[in-house]
Amino acid sequence: MNTGIFPPPKQRGLIIHGIITFILLVVVVVGFFQLTGLEVGSAFLIWLLVAMAAFVPLPFFAYRLGALYRANYEIDRDSLAITWGLRVEDIPLSDIEWIRPAEDLTNPLTMPALPLPGALLGLRRHADLGTVEFIASDSSKLLIIATAKRVFIISPEDPAGLAQTFARATEMGSLAPTEARSVYPSFIVSQAWESGLARYLWLSALFLNIGLFIWASLIIPSTPLVALAVQAASGTFQTVPSAQLIIFPVASLLLSVAGWIAGLYFYRGERERILAFILWGSGTFTSLLFLLAVLFIVTTPV
C-alpha cells in the first residue's frame, strides 16, 4: 500500500454553493447596475444597501466553493492528510487512537453552524468526545478520527475504505516518522502579516479603497453629472448621473478581495509566495488606477 485518496462527496455541495455564489453575484451586479441610472435618493439608497448586503457574504461562499472543490483526505503508511482550502491537517498515524463511524456514538453529534451540504466546518462540543472539529461535507458519511489532542470529524466518500486502509497501514508500520502539522486560515493571515511588504500592500489597498468609497460618496451628492460615457462624434462628452461613480469603488473592492484571498492561497508554500506578492501588489496598483480614473472623470469639464 502506498497512498489511499478518499475525497469527500462534492457534487451536491458544489451545486448548492455554486448557486448561492451565482445568486449573490447577480444581485451585486444588478444592484450596482440599477445605481448607475438613479439619482441620489431613497431608491438609490435601497439598491445600494441591497447590493452591499449581497456583496458581504459573497467572498465567504466563493471561498467555501473553492475549498470544497480542492478538498481531499489522503492516507499513507505515515500520516493522514486533510486538505480543505487554506485548512491543512497532517496527522501521524501513530497519533491516531481510533477511527469509527459517527453512528456508533450513543450521543449524536451536533452539526456546526450553517451546516450546508459541502461545508460542515467548525468546532462543536460533544458530551463524550469533548471538542470536535468538523472538516466534512456530508452528514450521512461522517467518520470520527480520535487523536490524543483533538477529535476530527471527516466525511470521505468511502468511510469504510478509509478505515480499512488505516487498519492495513497500522499493521504494516510507518516507513518514516512524521510530525503533526496544523494550518488554519488565520495562521496564514498572521504569518503573512509578519511580512513588512505584505503588511504594506494590504494596508495600501485598504486605505485606497476606503478613500475611493468616501470620495465617491462625497462627489455623488454635490455633482449631478459627470463625463463617464464615450466621447460623442461632435467632440463633446456625454454626461451621465454621478451615481454611476459608485461602480469604481465597488469594482476596486471586488478585485482587491479576490486578489487578497488568492494571495493567501499561494502564500502557503515557499515557492509560490512570489505569486502572492504579485497578486497583492496588483490589487494595490489596480485600486490606485481606479482612484486616478475617478480623478480624471471629475476633472473633465461637462
Image (cartoon, rainbow, N blue to C red):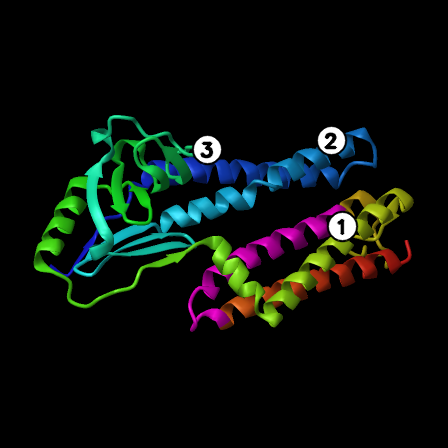
Q: Secondary structure at mark 3?
A: loop
Residue situated in front as seen by the camera: 286 or 166:
166
Residue tagged by mark 1? 213
Residue situated in front as seen by the camera: 67 or 25:
67
Kindly identify the amino acid type of the residue bearing the numbered disc 2.
Ile
* Above or below: residue 200 compared with residue 68: below
* Above or below: residue 11 compared with residue 249: above
Q: In the rendered view, does 61 fall on the left or right side of 174?
A: right
Label drawn at residue 114: 3
Residue tagged by mark 2? 46
Mark 3 Cα shell of 10 Å, populated few (<14), some (14-19), many (≥20): few
Q: Position of residue 59 (x, y in %)?
A: 54, 46
Q: Position of residue 76 (x, y in %)?
A: 19, 58
Residues in magenta?
246-273
Q: CA distance from mark 2 to mark 3?
A: 27 Å
Q: Position of residue 83 (x, y in %)?
A: 34, 53
Q: Earlier in the sequence, mark 1 or mark 2?
A: 2
Kindly identify the amino acid type of the residue bearing the numbered disc 3.
Leu
For the point 66% across and 67% down, the residue is 200
Q: Position of residue 241 (x, y in %)?
A: 82, 43
Q: CA distance from mark 1 to mark 2?
A: 17 Å
